[in-house]
């Protein structure tokens, strides 16, 4: 296909796409960041914390996706399967009228071609079924529970999907900002809370400029950049681990975003214990160090019984160039397995190569920790048809976020399937 060849020829920098859209979100979201609304009786810890009887992750850690070698005792691997077109799909759990959908992701209202088709594809795991979760029984079984989404705008996309899925059946909802969240809601009838904590790198970062008096980085020639404190969580979520009962983290896009963290003009400059790390670390190594620190921070801060998830990387689908080079995603159907490999194999080093690279870092980082992986990467890699693209008349195509309703609804089905597999008392 012409578009594929075009894709293969593009040797763009891998992932600056994030930046354009993130800049939009920065302006929208930061308006209200750091405004802590601490309602004491709600933040006070439950006297009956969730006790985990046994944790049986449905989707065991298996980065190689090696079906044949899986021991028979493992439960189904939801991350491996196929998308099936099902024209009979009934109405979704919510539609384009859900107010929490960010305008740029509202593909039906924004007239993205094929927007109504997106939800007619059903994920069929290889050896089991992934049912749509039922909002009412979900709320019933999560009374007095609080779930925090911590991460970049892709985690917000998933958070909005969950909110909209529950909104229709839930009765009265209170909008507030639990534990410093960017936004959050309590479904009053169930005392069930969900919140989104915005953070790009998990670690705290901010602009850095050379000090006239000099210093270690100055003597190496650095003039401008971003100071990243590998051992300090960003304030937007620092309280989240001791507040929520269930947490779902992500980070990734910003680590491969050279138009913000330009290796020459505005590099990431990692600090630990308040001191610059010398010699300076590359972003990839910095990511490993940050993940290690943030994961142990969460493990320490979380109350006993808190469920911890790390979501794997959400793939982008720019074809014919990156976001700022006219790249687009006009497809109306999922990719074939062969096309998926062309897009994402690390060997091909294409425009969206960061997807699997980020995951390699995640897999290493969560080994032996209390975190479970929520592996949405493979299923999402197929869905080049499910991004907003030019919906609503954008300057650049958005081939990174997802239309809502759309596939983050399936991510939440997966999330709920994981939760259901964990016995909670
Ligand atoms: C991958 O492609 C990028 C951009 O074209 C290039 O800078 C980089 O060196 C390539 N990496 C490898 C491992 O080939
Ligand atoms: C979508 O199409 C409708 C009907 O043609 C039109 O009224 C509306 O303005 C369009 N919306 C956008 C965001 O382009
Ligand atoms: C509501 O749920 C929270 C946990 O999310 C809990 O701490 C609090 O005690 C509950 N409130 C009531 C009135 O049960």
Image (tube, grey):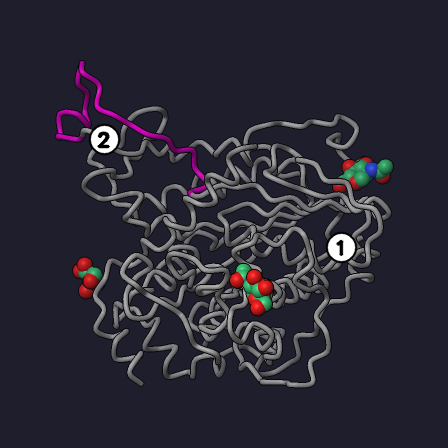
For the N terminus, the image quarter is bottom left
- Asked if residue 212 lies in the magenta stretch, the reply is yes
In the image, the segment drawn in magenta is 201-222
Q: Position of residue 260 (x, y in %)?
A: 31, 43
Q: Residue at x 17, y 18 (%)?
A: 214
User: What residue did someone put label 1 on?
Assistant: 167
Q: Residues within 10 Å of mark 1 (few under 14, many from 20)?
A: some
Q: Position of residue 371 (x, y in %)?
A: 55, 52
Q: Residue at x 29, y 68 (%)?
A: 346
Q: CA distance from mark 1 to mark 2?
A: 45 Å
88 left or right of 231? right
The residue lying toward the viewer, choosing from 151 and 64, is 151
Residue 48 in view of the camera: no
Q: Residues within 10 Å of mark 2 (few under 14, many from 20)?
A: some
Q: Residue at x 59, y 56 (%)?
A: 158
36 left or right of 146? left
Could you say whether the residue bearing mark 1 is in a helix, strand or loop? helix
Residues tagged 1 and 2 counted as in contact (Cβ below 8 A) = no
Quick check: is the Cβ at mark 1 less than 8 Å away from ligand 3?
A: no
Q: Eyeballing the image, is 214 above or below 84? A: above
Could you say whether the residue bearing mark 2 is in a helix, strand or loop? strand
User: What residue did someone put label 2 on?
Assistant: 224
């Amino acid at each position: 296909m012409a578009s594929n060849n075009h894709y293969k020829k593009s040797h763009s920098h891998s992932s600056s796409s994030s930046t354009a859209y993130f800049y939009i979100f920065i302006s929208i979201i930061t308006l209200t960041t750091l405004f802590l609304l601490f309602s004491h009786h709600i933040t006070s810890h439950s006297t009956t914390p969730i006790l985990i009887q046994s944790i049986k992750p449905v989707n065991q850690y298996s980065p190689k996706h090696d079906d044949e070698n899986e021991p028979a005792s493992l439960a189904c691997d939801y991350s491996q399967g196929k998308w099936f077109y099902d024209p009979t799909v009934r109405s979704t759990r919510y539609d384009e009228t859900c107010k929490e959908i960010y305008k740029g992701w509202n593909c039906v209202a924004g007239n993205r071609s094929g927007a109504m088709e997106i939800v007619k594809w059903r994920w069929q795991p290889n050896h089991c079924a992934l049912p749509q979760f039922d909002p009412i029984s979900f709320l019933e079984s999560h009374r007095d529970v609080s779930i925090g989404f911590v991460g970049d705008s892709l985690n917000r996309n998933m958070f909005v999907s969950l909110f909209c899925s529950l909104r229709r059946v839930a009765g009265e909802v209170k909008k507030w900002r639990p534990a410093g969240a960017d936004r959050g809601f309590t479904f009053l009838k169930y005392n069930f809370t969900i919140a989104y904590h915005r953070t790009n790198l998990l670690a705290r970062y901010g602009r850095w400029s050379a000090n006239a008096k000099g210093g270690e980085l100055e003597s190496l020639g650095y003039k401008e950049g971003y100071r990243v404190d590998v051992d300090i969580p960003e304030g937007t979520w620092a309280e989240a681990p001791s507040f929520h009962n269930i947490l779902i983290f992500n980070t990734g896009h910003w680590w491969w975003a050279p138009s913000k963290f330009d290796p020459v003009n505005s590099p990431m400059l990692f600090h630990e214990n308040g001191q610059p790390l010398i010699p300076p670390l590359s972003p990839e190594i910095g990511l490993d160090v940050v993940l290690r620190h943030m994961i142990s921070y969460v493990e320490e801060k979380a109350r006993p019984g808190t469920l911890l998830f790390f979501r794997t990387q959400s793939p982008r689908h720019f074809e014919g160039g990156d976001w700022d080079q006219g790249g687009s995603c006009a497809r109306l159907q999922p990719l074939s397995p062969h096309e998926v490999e062309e897009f994402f194999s690390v060997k091909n080093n294409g425009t969206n190569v960061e997807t699997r690279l980020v995951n390699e870092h995640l897999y290493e980082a969560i080994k032996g920790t209390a975190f479970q992986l929520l592996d949405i990467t493979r299923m999402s890699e197929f869905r080049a048809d499910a991004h907003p693209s030019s919906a609503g008349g954008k300057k650049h195509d958005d081939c990174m976020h997802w239309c809502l309703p759309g596939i983050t609804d399936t991510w939440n089905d997966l999330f709920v399937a994981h939760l259901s597999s964990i016995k909670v008392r």
